[in-house]
Amino acid sequence: MDTPSLTEARENQARAKLAEGVFLDSHDFHTFNNVPVQAGLRTIQIDHVIVSRFGIFAVETKNRNGWIYGSRSDRQWTQMIAGRKYKFPNPLRRSLIHTLGLAKALGLSMNKMHPVIVFWGNCEFRTIMPLNVLNNKLTGFIKSKKKAILTDAEVAVVCAKLNRMKETTARDTGRTAKMLMRWFGKN
């Protein structure tokens, strides 16, 4: 129960794509989904990256129901549903790792970045959450940023870098699949 199923994860990401597409002007906001980022020796994946003159939004999505308890300093947060408690890792920590990796990959400082965690599903926060932890209110949070911190040229450069990152990973994944097929056959 503590980890959403693959179907729930796909539904979660589809909701985010729909919300972004409907409520954010594609001229001002450029959305990239499932963005691979090199973090040390491993590759991590950011659910959504939204690029605008108002900053880079690194969006981590969570599909949870029930009551959610947690604070910035807790190692684990708690989901309570149907009288049962389930622990899950503090999403702020993962979001910070993702955002730091993305800032480094893009050659930007953290003051250009907005880490965001969005909980989808029928959940209610039972503790006070930081402003970047949201319950189904992604578009409002993004639109609340009114001060331009990137130029149009910088936005174009960031978008080009994100496209290259996605293309490189897709190409590498294809090479790896071909290599594995040669090593282990088609079965």
Image: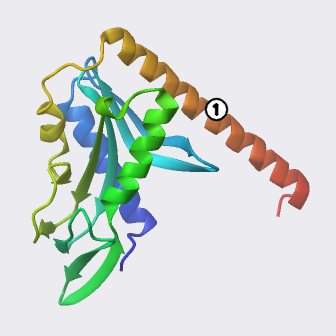
87 on left or right of 162: left
Tell me the residue at 32%/66% (across/down): 90
Q: Is residue 164 above or below residue 124?
A: above
Figure check: 149 above or below 167: above
Q: Is residue 39 above or below residue 185?
A: above
Determine which quarter of the picture holds residue 140: top left
Residue under label 1: 168
**Dot 1: few (<14), some (14–19), or many (≥20) neighbours within 10 Å?**
few
Q: Is residue 34 visible?
A: no
> Picture coordinates of residue 101 (x, y %)?
48, 42
The residue lying at 75 percent from left, 49 percent from top is 177
Q: Indicate the position of residue 50 as horizontal and vertical percent values.
A: 33, 33
Asked if one can make out residue 80 in the rendered structure from this viewpoint, the answer is yes
At label 1, the amino acid type is Thr
- Which residue appears at 38% of the width and 69% of the height? 4
Q: Is residue 103 left or right of residue 56?
A: right
**Nearest the camera: 39 or 52?**
39
Quadrant (top left, top right, bottom left, bottom right) of the C terminus: bottom right
Q: Give the mark count.
A: 1
Q: Position of residue 93 (x, y in %)?
A: 36, 58
Taking depth in this image into account, of 2 and 121 the one nearest to the observer is 2
**Residue 87 picture quarter:** bottom left
Residue 103 shown left or right of residue 40 in the figure: left
